[in-house]
Image (tube, rainbow, N blue to C red):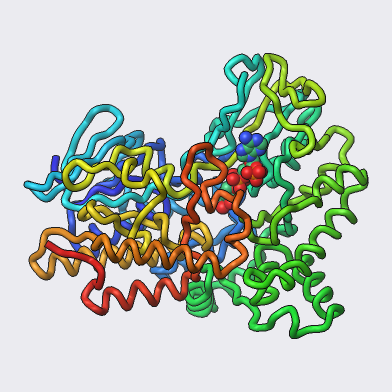
């Protein structure tokens, strides 16, 4: 079977790409999705407490006002089921399902230089060809289960949060060990603790967290969001991170220490990722950042009653927001429960998993269930799971051995007509994803339309343009405190053997959008067509 365009993935990115290529350009487009239904990341992430950190009125598509009018989220932050229901609504409204094949994982894609098309293979061995190949495989969809010795011998059950059983897990009466205290672990622990007999949280790196303050949305809020659709969209599309709130123009030094505390207090009460938006220099100035860090550490100490546990939770080794900042619902309070314990792996590292549980340096922790909240092989992982081969049989896995090289996070030199939506080198995970996704999908659609309009067959970046963009990505990161947290997954540090390169573009989604628009306006500068 030949398609004009084959899209891998049916999350936010794949659905909108299908709509644009099929309905706006009239292409014969098809989506192959590994999961059994829509949702992408949200098809797999169903762990206890799972919830999006972006607010509902911003975590959505903005391309259709009508769509926005039709859909109401029930809570401030949408959970996986509601996100899947939203995507189902989108798919029905635009009749997308008829061009999506589920349970179909793309395993390999090879560019045929003579025919100028992609030969694509699925897990079941089926093949097809496509002129355009778009990877809409997400940034956080390749689960990272650390290679801790002994896991195979464990007699209990173990789960990774990103591959959670659809039927759920019953923790009642069970001794549970949770490894990982990132955004996921911080969401999961309070919910697991409610039903488990005992929960032990194994913490390698202590983390800041701000209360999410999730709550049902009122009819007044829905009315406000409907009436302010254009304004919300304009903010989301013009801020550095794609959220529907502006970052304050002031610096920490512009206000008195008392005023600074008052501002943090108010942001803490309001809750959510807006805490980052209180001052514009929080991510660029160490001293400014330290004021936020100290405020948040003091909050941990005020909440957690046991001083040793509070010390371990507040012993945070990186600037606030330099690693992905979680938001939570009762995370630190959880450690006041009698059935919850914290193990500080910095002092008492894991030695191995035994048939009975987890053995750290000081003792054995008997467990019935281990929950790995250990994150993902982010950004490059989902792409490199596929064996992608470009001109002359060159392999993406080989080409990216020292780190990903892309032009704008959109294309890779030597891989014509292959696009990555929110790929490495684009703002991606530093943003409210649907807004970044819409920008990419529309840019890709325009680029394909340009190639077709001009009677051309292929488009790919010049090697020099990709090299220069790679330098820009590193410079943008170095201008922020993100570059200080070398042990973050933004660098790939969480996956053993992964090259240590800062992967997302940290210069801001707004600046990035202008760069992409300028490049297109100048006749797709840096791209080579054929
Ligand atoms: P993250 O943010 O990568 O967090 C993973 C956590 O697991 C983090 O605390 C890690 O500690 C810990 N981890 C990873 N490997 C190990 C080993 N081997 N031993 C002990 N602890 C380990 O993933 P999340 O799923 O929480 O969040 C991912 C994104 O999803 C999030 O940012 C949102 O965008 C949504 P570390 O910090 O590496 O020391």
Quadrant for the N terminus in the image: top left
Q: Give above or below for 196 relative to 21.
A: above
Q: Is residue 192 left or right of residue 403?
A: right
Q: Residue at x 32, y 57 (%)?
A: 17
- Location of residue 215 in the rendering, given as x and y in whole percent from the top left corner: 70, 58
Q: Is residue 277 left or right of residue 348?
A: left
Quadrant for the C terminus in the image: bottom left
- Which quadrant holds residue 34? top left
- Location of residue 31 in the rendering, given as x and y in whole percent from the top left corner: 29, 46
Q: Is residue 49 left or right of residue 384?
A: right
Residue 88 visible, this angle: no
> Residue lying farthest bottom?
254
- Location of residue 483 in the rendering, given as x and y in whole percent from the top left corner: 58, 60
Q: Give above or below for 473 relative to 148.
A: below
- Location of residue 484 in the rendering, given as x and y in whole percent from the top left corner: 62, 59
- Which quadrant holds residue 55? bottom right
Q: Residue at x 43, y 65 (%)?
A: 67
Q: Residue at x 53, y 74 (%)?
A: 239
Q: Is residue 58 left or right of residue 294?
A: left
Residue 500 visible, this angle: yes
Q: How many marks?
A: 0
Nearest the viewer among 199 and 420 is 420
Q: Residue at x 32, y 62 (%)?
A: 466
Nearest the viewer among 103 and 529 is 529
Quadrant position of ligand 1: top right
Nearest the viewer among 69 and 356 is 356
């Amino acid at each position: 079977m030949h398609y004009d365009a084959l899209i891998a993935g049916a999350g936010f990115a794949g659905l909108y790409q299908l709509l644009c290529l099929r309905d706006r350009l009239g292409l014969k487009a098809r989506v192959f999705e590994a999961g059994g239904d829509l949702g992408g990341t949200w098809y797999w992430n169903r762990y206890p407490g799972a919830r999006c950190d972006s607010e509902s009125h911003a975590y959505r598509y903005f391309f259709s006002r009508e769509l926005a009018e039709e859909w109401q989220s029930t809570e401030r932050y949408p959970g996986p089921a509601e996100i899947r229901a939203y995507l189902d609504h989108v798919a029905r409204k635009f009749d997308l399902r008829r061009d999506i094949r589920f349970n179909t994982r793309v395993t390999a894609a090879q560019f045929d230089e003579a025919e100028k098309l992609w030969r694509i293979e699925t897990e079941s061995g089926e093949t097809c060809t496509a002129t355009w190949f778009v990877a809409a495989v997400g940034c956080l969809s390749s689960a990272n289960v650390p290679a801790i010795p002994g896991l195979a011998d464990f007699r209990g059950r173990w789960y990774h949060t990103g591959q959670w059983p659809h039927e759920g897990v019953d923790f009642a009466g069970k001794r549970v060990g949770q490894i990982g205290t990132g955004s996921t672990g911080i969401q999961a622990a309070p919910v697991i603790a409610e039903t488990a007999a005992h929960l032990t949280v194994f913490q390698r790196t202590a983390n800041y967290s701000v209360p999410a303050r999730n709550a049902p949305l009122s009819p007044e809020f829905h009315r406000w969001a409907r009436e302010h659709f254009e304004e919300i969209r304009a903010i989301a599309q013009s801020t550095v991170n794609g959220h529907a709130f502006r970052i304050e123009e002031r610096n920490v030094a512009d206000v008195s220490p008392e005023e600074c505390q008052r501002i943090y207090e108010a942001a803490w009460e309001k809750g959510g990722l807006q805490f980052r938006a209180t001052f514009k220099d929080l991510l660029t100035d160490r001293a400014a950042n330290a004021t936020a860090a100290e405020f948040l550490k003091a909050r941990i100490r005020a909440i957690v009653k046991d001083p040793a546990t509070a010390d371990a939770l507040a012993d945070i080794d990186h600037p606030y927001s330099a690693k992905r900042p979680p938001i939570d619902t009762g995370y630190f309070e959880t450690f006041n429960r009698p059935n919850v314990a914290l193990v500080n792996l910095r002092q008492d590292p894991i030695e191995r998993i035994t048939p009975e549980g987890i053995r750290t340096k000081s003792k054995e922790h008997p467990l019935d269930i281990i929950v790995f909240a250990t994150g993902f092989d982010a950004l490059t992982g989902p792409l490199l799971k596929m064996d992608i081969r470009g001109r002359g049989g060159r392999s993406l896995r080989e080409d990216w051995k020292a780190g990903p090289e892309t032009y704008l996070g959109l294309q890779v030199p030597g891989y014509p007509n292959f696009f990555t939506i929110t790929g490495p080198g684009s703002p991606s995970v530093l943003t409210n994803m649907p807004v970044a996704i819409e920008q990419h999908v529309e840019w890709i659609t325009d680029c394909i339309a340009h190639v077709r309009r001009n009677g051309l067959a292929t488009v790919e970046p010049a090697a020099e343009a990709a090299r220069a963009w790679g330098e820009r990505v590193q410079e943008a990161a170095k201008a922020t405190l993100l570059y200080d947290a070398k042990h973050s997954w933004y660098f790939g540090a969480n996956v053993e053997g992964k090259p240590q390169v800062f992967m997302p573009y940290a210069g801001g989604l707004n600046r990035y959008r202008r760069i992409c628009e300028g490049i297109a306006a100048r006749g797709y500068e840096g791209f080579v067509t054929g």
